[in-house]
């Protein structure tokens, strides 16, 4: 069977009030793409929206956590490029168009990383201190001559996770079967980038904000920060790049960045 060029898999969980808005955004693209709903919590709410837009629903029956849902989604659909669209987020109409252009310039990429903006109280936020820091961390990944090297890929991850998971497009045939599937919750994507950083494939980044990541009370990131799980997970990740004493020191600084995820 011939692979589709690009597929959005919209990850739906329970009954999010933002799900339909997310689906509308991925269906309203300037170039042809495919849209599928992925879930581990099948219900009538999701089914009704799927029927309304004539979308297939794939169900992860072996759910063991967020990571297992991500890995399941990536390997359940035959597609050259896959974007895991989170149900709370929205995608600009030229998202896929820009991803395809970036992929043409970087055919050896394992992941394609565009910039993004945040949605806070229904307003688009394109810059703040946290954004500026992340863009500095990602800057070396703009250059295809070096963004395929292990050193540069890991350099971008050594001081924190600057990559917004729902903004990323994955090159399917470069993805290991288990990449996200772990016991982590908030740092599950950082864990995956660390795995990919040691494998062949470029981390191709371009600084154009083409999707919106919503910050709100019900988001996984906000919940895990409020429950103090993120600090423990971040220390675990820093120790993959640094000696323990350095990891602990960096984490004290990194904790301050979490405050920008506070919706109040």
Image (cartoon, helix red, strand yellow):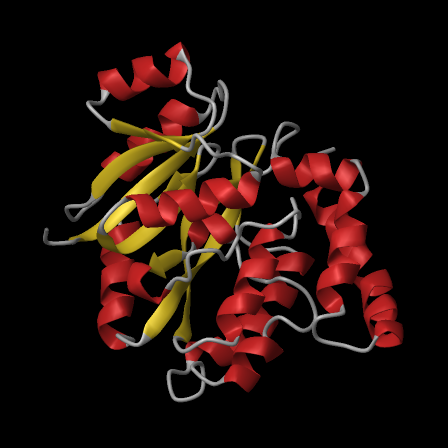
Q: Quick one: 74 or 167, which is closer to the camera?
A: 74
Q: Is residue 93 visible?
A: no
Say above or below: 219 vs 185: above
Q: Nearer the viewer, residue 68 or 215?
A: 68
Q: Quadrant of the C terminus?
A: top right
Q: Nearer the viewer, residue 23 or 207?
A: 23
Let me know if residue 88 appears in the view.
Answer: yes
- The location of residue 93, given as percent across then percent down, is 27, 44
166 vs 49: above or below? below
- Taking the spot 65% from the left edge, 44% from the top edge, the residue there is 185
Residue 245 picture quarter: bottom right
Residues 116 and 103: in front is 103
Is 78 displayed left or right of 241 in the figure?
Answer: left
- Residue at the outermost front position: 62
Residue shown at the point (54%, 49%) measured from the top left:
181
Q: Residue at x 50, y 52 (%)?
A: 165
Locate residue 32 relative to residue 79 in the image: left or right. Answer: left
- Reply above or below: 114 against 225: below
Q: Residue furthest bottom?
A: 145
> Residue 27 location in percent, x, y?
24, 35
**Number of labelled discs?**
0
Residue 139 percent location from the top left of the image? 52, 76
Residue 137 horizontal side relative to residue 82, left or right: right
Q: How far from the left and from the top, in percent, is residue 142?
A: 43, 77
Q: Residue at x 60, y 51 (%)?
A: 188
Query: Which residue lies most toward the left here?
Result: 1
């Amino acid at each position: 069977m011939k692979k589709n060029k690009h597929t959005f898999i919209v990850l739906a969980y329970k009954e999010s009030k933002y799900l339909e808005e997310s689906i509308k955004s991925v269906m309203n693209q300037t170039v042809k793409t495919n849209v599928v709903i992925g879930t581990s919590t099948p219900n009538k709410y999701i089914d009704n929206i799927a029927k309304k837009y004539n979308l297939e629903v794939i169900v992860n029956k072996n759910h063991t956590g967020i990571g297992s849902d991500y890995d399941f989604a990536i390997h359940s659909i035959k597609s050259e490029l896959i974007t895991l669209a989170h149900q709370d987020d929205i995608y600009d109409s030229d998202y896929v168009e820009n991803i395809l252009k970036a992929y043409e310039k970087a055919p050896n990429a394992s992941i394609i990383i565009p910039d993004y903006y945040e949605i806070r109280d229904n307003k688009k936020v394109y810059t703040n201190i946290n954004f500026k820091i992340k863009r500095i961390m990602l800057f070396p990944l703009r250059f295809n001559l070096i963004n395929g090297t292990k050193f540069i890929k890991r350099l971008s991850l050594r001081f924190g996770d600057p990559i917004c998971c729902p903004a990323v497009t994955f090159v399917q045939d470069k993805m290991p079967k288990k990449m996200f599937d772990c016991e982590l919750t908030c740092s599950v994507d950082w864990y995956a980038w660390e795995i990919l950083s040691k494998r062949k494939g470029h981390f191709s980044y371009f600084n154009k904000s083409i999707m919106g990541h919503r910050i709100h009370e019900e988001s996984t990131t906000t919940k895990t920060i409020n429950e103090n799980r993120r600090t423990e997970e971040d220390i675990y990740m820093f120790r993959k790049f640094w000696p323990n004493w350095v990891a602990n020191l960096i984490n004290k600084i990194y904790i301050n960045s979490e405050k920008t995820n506070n919706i109040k």
